[in-house]
Image (cartoon, helix red, strand yellow):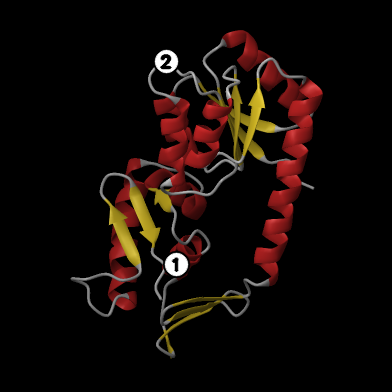
Amino acid sequence: MNKPLILVVEDDSPVRNLITTTLKTNDYRYLMAVNGEEAILEASSHNPDIVLLDLGLPDMDGVQVIRNIRSWSNLPIIVISARSEDSDKIEALDAGADDYLTKPFSVEELLARLRVTQRRLSYMTAEMLAASSVFVNGKLRIDYAGGCAYLDGQELHLTPIEYKLLCLLSKNVGKVLTHTFITQNIWGRSWDNDIASLRVFMATLRKKLEPRPDSPQYIQTHIGVGYRMMKVE
């Protein structure tokens, strides 16, 4: 079982060091953020598997971070906070948190919560893989095994890059994928000229995919951020 990538959002140095040392000792991969703005940037740029989130951040309340991430992703969020009132827990969970751990906490309990979340992620991934040999969204159909895509029953003649872009978007349907995330997945890097190339490839893909270019159904542009494949009924 591969260890997930964990984003640690904590402005308190001793607590952050405790968490990251625990993760490192147990061979977890991790990223760090010390405020809400950094947390949202790291989450959107790197698409971590799990977020460990403190609520008392210096620039914004952690609940705002949860709501922001929930607007484009369902990645698991475990709150680690000194706030122990039921009302605080309910607010965080209602905003979209998956779990709530109160400070002070034991390292063993943190690892146990991570293992539970990781098992749930593995189960969900296995379920998705079992059902994901063919992707259907409205009149779009992608046969991942065959390496082909069809629109309204007609095969789309896509370049290798266009096909990779289409598959990446389809496997993250409903999520906004940032320019950086897409270019890193397609070209393995993210330079300015890669982002310029991305815009060109996305334009040619859309010409083949969208019946009405003036009213796109499948790919939505988030100006200055990235792209999202929308769910089409």
Q: Residues within 10 Å of mark 1 (few under 14, many from 20)?
A: many
Q: Is residue 222 left or right of residue 161?
A: left
Q: Residue at x 39, y 73 (%)?
A: 232
Residue 188: tell me if it is visible: yes
Q: Badge 2 is on which residue?
A: 58
Q: Residue at x 31, y 60 (%)?
A: 220
Quadrant housing the C terminus:
bottom left
Q: Nearer the viewer, residue 102 or 226?
A: 102
| Secondary structure found at label 2 | loop
Three-letter amino acid code of the residue under disc 1 = Leu
Q: Residues within 10 Å of mark 2 (few under 14, many from 20)?
A: some
In x, y percent, where is residue 5? 64, 38
Q: Nearer the viewer, residue 117 or 7?
A: 117
In x, y percent, where is residue 55? 51, 23
Separation (CA) of disc 1 from disc 2: 39 Å
The number of numbered discs placed on residues in the rendered structure image is: 2
Q: Nearer the viewer, residue 134 or 51?
A: 51
Q: Residue at x 70, y 65 (%)?
A: 127
Q: Who comes first in sequence, dot 1 or dot 2?
A: 2
Above or below 163: residue 60:
above
Residue 45: tell me if it is visible: no
Q: Badge 1 is on which residue?
A: 166
Three-letter amino acid code of the residue under disc 2 = Pro
Q: Residue at x 44, y 51 (%)?
A: 182
In x, y percent, where is residue 62? 47, 27
